[in-house]
Image (cartoon, rainbow, N blue to C red):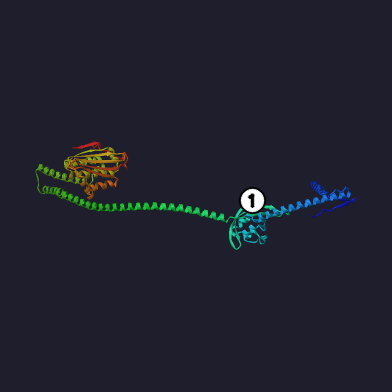
Amino acid sequence: MSSMPLFAMNGKVKIPATDPTLRRRAEARLRQQKQNRKATGSAPKPECDPQRSLYELEIHQVELEMQNAELREARNRTEILLEKYTDLYDFAPVGYFSLDQQGQILEVNLTGASLLGVERSRLVTLRFSRFVAAESQPIFRDFLQRVFTEDGEQVCEAALLKERTAGFWSSLHGTAAIAMSDTRKWCRVAVTDITFFKQAEEAQHRLEMLAVANRDLKEEIARRLKVEQALKKSERHSRLLLTQSHRMQDQLRLLSRQLLSAQEEERKKISRELHDVIAQTLTGISVRLAALKTNAIVDIKELERKIRDTQQLVQQSVEIVQRFARELRPTVLDDVGLIPALHTYMKSFREQTGIRVNLSAFADVEELIGERRTVLFRVAQEALTNIARHAHANEVEVSIQKLDAAIRVIIKDDGKGFPAERLLQARKRKRLGLLGMSERLEMIGGTLIVESVPAKGTTIIAQVPLLNRIPASQVRKQPPGSFNGRESNLL
């Protein structure tokens, strides 16, 4: 127990002044002690100056005892707080580092030393940058500069090195501070191991990348399935086209043979016509001219008659040649139009076959371009030729109708007709007449329909799209007295 010095003044003991509160507490405790002694039978001593000094000394002694007790209690509390602080500082879940402006480690807790894998005594005076990975050095330097130059807490993430083990990712939180003893600047840095979070972020990133790759894979699978389906469809379509191509090749070969046969038959016909008619007529003309040359004819009338007979033979030859030309290509189709050409052909058809033909049409059909008009003319010509050869008809109705986007030609006869099975067989055999009409129509996007019932006649329907019309101003004007495009009855 410590004691305070006593000073003597004028033969009296001088007690140093104390805290009034402490003195009152000491007097109260001394009275309590005296009461306790009185209760035990101790008689009070008379008051005198020595006794007064003794009283003061006793009070002071009580004060000292009370002060010593409070000091011991304060020391105990301080030791407990220091122990708690030490525990909190050293065993905190994060590492605490005190760094100066150069990054030198001034203090560090046990957790910080454990994070770096170095004993705490060895860390002090080392530079913190020694434990920063090379790729994170610029980040750490910038972080340390911001801590000392900017207000508030600064944060960064850096890769730190750990002795004898693998490195780790850390989160650094720094705050500038000033020492109480001097003005040297230093800062507090809290270091947290965030390797797990980095790994979680990396795993999450990989999961996202996998999800994207999975989505792309699903899209690629769906795309490939579509491509596969398209390829299968294309393969089926290709097989169909190949089959159609083979069939069309067969048809073309058949058509070629039939065309060659038809051409040969046509040549034979023309040859016979030229030999039997033109050659004989020209021979007759030659004989008559030779007779006129060798026989001197005085009779003028006889001479005129022979010349007239010769002119008739020449005229017959001209008409035959013109008929051949019309059958090969009617000039009226190019010079005047479709309707007059049909009118002329049907008139000749009536004269040759005796079959009546009725034609009805609309005048705007002449606005079609030449190719389509030629196709319609050839279809009608071939249909009438087939009627003359096979139908045994008495009358034929030819109608040219205008639809919304097409022109339809209907050729109907009252002949004997034929059953549908025969029509199918004819299509399979691709007879030249039907095949020729069908091929001509297909070249311009048209269609051909043949309907026939035994004893009720046959109907041929040809339809072509109403496209590529020529301006009405370019349509050739029909000469006076020609067919007006409405209706014509060939009797």
| Of residues 184 and 188, the one drawn nearer to the viewer in this rendering | 188
Farthest residue in the right direction?
A: 10
Q: Secondary structure at mark 1?
A: loop
Farthest residue in the bottom direction?
A: 164
User: Residue 16 location, x and y as percent?
Assistant: 84, 50
In the displayed structure, does residue 345 sit left or right of residue 111?
Answer: left
Task: Give above or below for 324 relative to 128.
Answer: above
How many numbered marks have been drawn onto this rendered protein structure?
A: 1
User: Residue 102 location, x and y as percent?
Assistant: 67, 57
Task: Give above or below for 289 relative to 127.
Answer: above
Whether residue 167 is visible: yes
Residue under the point 31% across and 52% down: 240
Farthest residue in the front direction?
A: 41
User: Residue 3 location, x and y as percent?
Assistant: 81, 54
In the displayed structure, does residue 13 sit left or right of residue 314?
Answer: right
In the displayed structure, does residue 29 sit left or right of residue 457?
Answer: right
Q: Quadrant of the C terminus?
A: top left
Which of the 4 image quarters holds residue 168?
bottom right
Residue under the point 86% across and 50% down: 53
| Of residues 188 and 220, the one drawn nearer to the viewer in this rendering | 188
Q: Quadrant of the N terminus?
A: bottom right
Q: What's the residue type where badge 1 is placed?
A: Glu
Which of the 4 image quarters holds residue 457?
top left
In the displayed structure, does residue 215 sit left or right of residue 37?
Answer: left
Answer few, some or many: residues within 10 Å of disc 1's Cα (few below 14, many 20 plus, some between 14 and 19).
few
Whether residue 336 is visible: no
User: Residue 198 location, x and y as percent?
Assistant: 56, 55
| Of residues 219 and 257, the one drawn nearer to the viewer in this rendering | 219
Q: Which residue is mark 1?
A: 153
Which of the 4 image quarters holds residue 314?
top left
